[in-house]
Structures are given as structure tokens and as C-alpha cells.
Amino acid sequence: MRRKDRLVEDRAGLEEILERADACRLAFSAGGEPYIVALNYGYDWAEGEGSLPVLYFHGAREGRKMELARAAPRVCFQLDCDHELLAGPDPCDWGMKYASLVGYGTLREITGEPARLAALSSLMRHYGWKGEGSFKPPVLGATAVLELRVAEMSGKRKA
């Protein structure tokens, strides 16, 4: 990273960005063409020194995203939050406050029912669901659940 003064390295800072962001973009590469999609997500963070998060996504069982996830599961992800425009007297004085994460990992479809439900519950918690409830079987049956095991990630913040 060129701007070391903006680097976010500590788990608390990285997890704060994960918690505050509201969409995660996945970038796929297949056949030499890039493809990016914005998704709702949930996450869990394993305990232990040097551990990285696991991100969860859901969507239709068919479509380009699922085709690419199956064919080329190595992806790049990006998410950001805390945007605030900084205006100045001259164009070069303008800027933007933000916090972001960029990383790499491997996607896989979760097939076991308990793991699918746990991943979907993580996703719902991320968006504020605090209640008890169940996922409707017809909807659950039509839903693919993906897990992204993060292999590397870096954070950046401009305050």
C-alpha cells in the first residue's frame, strides 16, 4: 500500500469496517473478462491470532454469478463505508473520507442445511435482525449460499 498512513491493520479496525459497510463487491475473472457484482453479506471471524473473516452471500441458484463461482472460485472482494465529501477552495483541495477493505479468497457453495442456516443467520445479523425466526422452506430451497474464505485482506481509512 502506497499510503501507509491510511493502513488499517488491527483486527478491531478491520472488523469495524466489515460491520459498517452495507454491500460487498465480488470480482470474478473468467475467460479474460472481469465481472463484478455487489452483494449483501454476513461474516464471522474465527478466534485466534492472525485469523481472517469468513464472508457469506446468498442469491439465486442459477445465473452468471453462480456459473463463475463454480468455474473460477478465486475472487477479489471490496467493501467501503463512512463516505464524506471534503470540499475546499480549489479543485485539488477536494477529497473524500472513507474506510475500505480489499482482499482475496476462495468461494464455495455451502450445501449442508445447518451450515446454510448459520450463514444466512450471520447475514441477517449483519443487517440488524435480532429476532428469532425461520427461513421459509420454498425460499430456502431456491437460495444458494456462498462462503468466502478470506486468504488475505487489507484495510484503508482516510479520516
Image (spheres, rainbow, N blue to C red):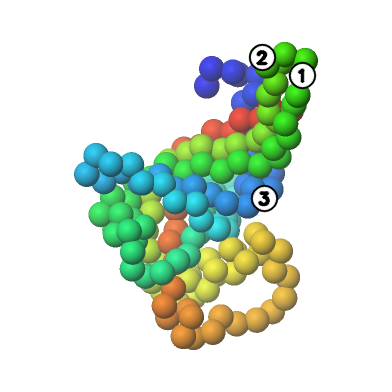
Residue 45 is tagged as none
Where residue 55 appears, as percent x and y from the top left, is 51, 54
Where residue 10 appears, as percent x and y from the top left, is 65, 34
Neighbor class of circle 1 (other Cα within 10 Å; few <14, some 14-19, many 20+) is few
Identified by mark 2, the residue type is Cys
Q: Residue at x 62, y 66 (%)?
A: 124
Q: Residue at x 67, y 61 (%)?
A: 127
Residue, far bottom: 137
Residue toward you, 103 or 9: 103
Q: Residue at x 64, y 24 (%)?
A: 6
Residue linked to disc 3: 19
Residue linked to disc 1: 88
Q: Looking at the image, do the residues carrying marks 1 and 2 touch, with CB atoms under 8 Å apart?
A: yes
Neighbor class of circle 3 (other Cα within 10 Å; few <14, some 14-19, many 20+) is some
Residue linked to disc 2: 92
Count of numbered circles on the image? 3
